[in-house]
């Protein structure tokens, strides 16, 4: 598990998220396929279903999320928040584009639907900004372990570079969402719900992507320890507003 406290973000109350995402946007990953080997049919079969699922999940336009962010900003005098959210959504879409590029290179077709993505989208829209953020950050914490496992699965330099970029981007995302939950001042009972949601989600993800996790060196126990460890860090940040 990676510690969020290693990130160079000290004073979160003054951190300029829009500038952070905009700067990332100016330094996007150039995927190098010059050393890329051809994947064996077994390797393709192993990684394709979960990559298709994540590629779909990262591609959300985030219209409802942006609508919630604008409403929150209007009520709480936080005009910078929708701008930061707009850049955040763009960064997620870059993640989808990286995976799509990899899929195109290896002739892995995109999927119009993903069961997991459909469930996440449904859950995110069950309330306002709070439920959007809670579901989103849960998925992001699980994604950290997924991309680490995926990088170790197949001997692909391109995929390893994509997974490295995902980790670099997703860690600050977890801080961004957790700090929003701090500002939203959630009820202690909600923290229990976050634990239950994490336990249910990581179990479903494990059941549907077990082969990738196992090939990447993850047992269920390791996945659970990582995910619950990230959740603990996120809840601490949600409670006191600091890393
Ligand atoms: Fe992402
Ligand atoms: Fe993310």
Image (cartoon, grey):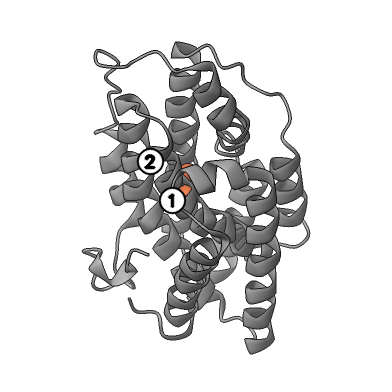
Looking at the rendered structure, which numbered label has been put on residue 152? 2
Residue 236 in the image, given as x and y percentages of width and height:
44, 82
Indicate left or right for 194 with 223 as reference: right
SS assignment at label 1: loop
Q: Quadrant of the C terminus?
A: bottom left
Specify which label sits upstream in the sequence, 2 or 1. Answer: 2
Residue 71 in the image, given as x and y percentages of width and height:
62, 59
Q: Report the front residue among 210 and 9.
A: 210
Residue drawn at (56%, 75%) of the image: 184
Indicate left or right for 125 with 144 as reference: right
Residue 192 in the image, given as x and y percentages of width and height:
66, 82
Vertical placement of 30 versus 242: above or below? above
Residue drawn at (47%, 28%) of the image: 99
Is there CB contact under 8 Å for labels 2 and 1? yes
Per the model, the C-alpha gap separating discs 2 and 1 is 8 Å
Q: Residues within 10 Å of mark 1 (few under 14, many from 20)?
A: some
Residue beneath disc 1: 217
Looking at the rendered structure, which numbered label has been put on residue 32? none
Q: How many marks?
A: 2
Q: Report the front residue among 11 and 218.
A: 218
């Amino acid at each position: 598990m990676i510690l969020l406290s290693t990130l160079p973000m000290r004073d979160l109350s003054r951190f300029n998220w829009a500038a952070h995402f905009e700067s990332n946007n100016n330094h996007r990953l150039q995927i190098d396929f010059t050393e890329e080997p051809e994947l064996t049919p077994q390797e393709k079969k192993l990684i394709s279903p979960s990559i298709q699922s994540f590629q779909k999940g990262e591609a959300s336009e985030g219209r409802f999320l942006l609508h919630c962010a604008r409403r929150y900003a209007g009520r709480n005098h936080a005009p910078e928040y929708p701008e930061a959210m707009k850049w955040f959504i763009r960064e997620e879409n870059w993640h989808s584009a990286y995976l799509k590029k990899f899929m195109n290179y290896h002739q892995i077709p995109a999927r119009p639907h993903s069961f997991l993505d459909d469930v996440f989208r449904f859950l995110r829209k069950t309330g306002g900004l709070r439920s959007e953020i809670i579901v989103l950050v849960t998925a992001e914490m699980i994604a950290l372990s997924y991309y680490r496992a995926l990088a170790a699965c197949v001997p692909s330099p391109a995929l390893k570079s994509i997974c490295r970029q995902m980790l670099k981007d997703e860690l600050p995302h977890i801080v961004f969402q957790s700090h929003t939950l701090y500002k939203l001042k959630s009820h202690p009972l909600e923290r229990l719900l976050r634990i239950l949601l994490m336990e249910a989600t990581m179990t479903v993800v494990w059941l549907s992507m077990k082969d990738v996790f196992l090939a990447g060196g993850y047992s269920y126990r390791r996945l659970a320890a990582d995910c619950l460890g990230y959740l603990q860090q996120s809840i601490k940040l949600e409670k006191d507003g600091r890393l």
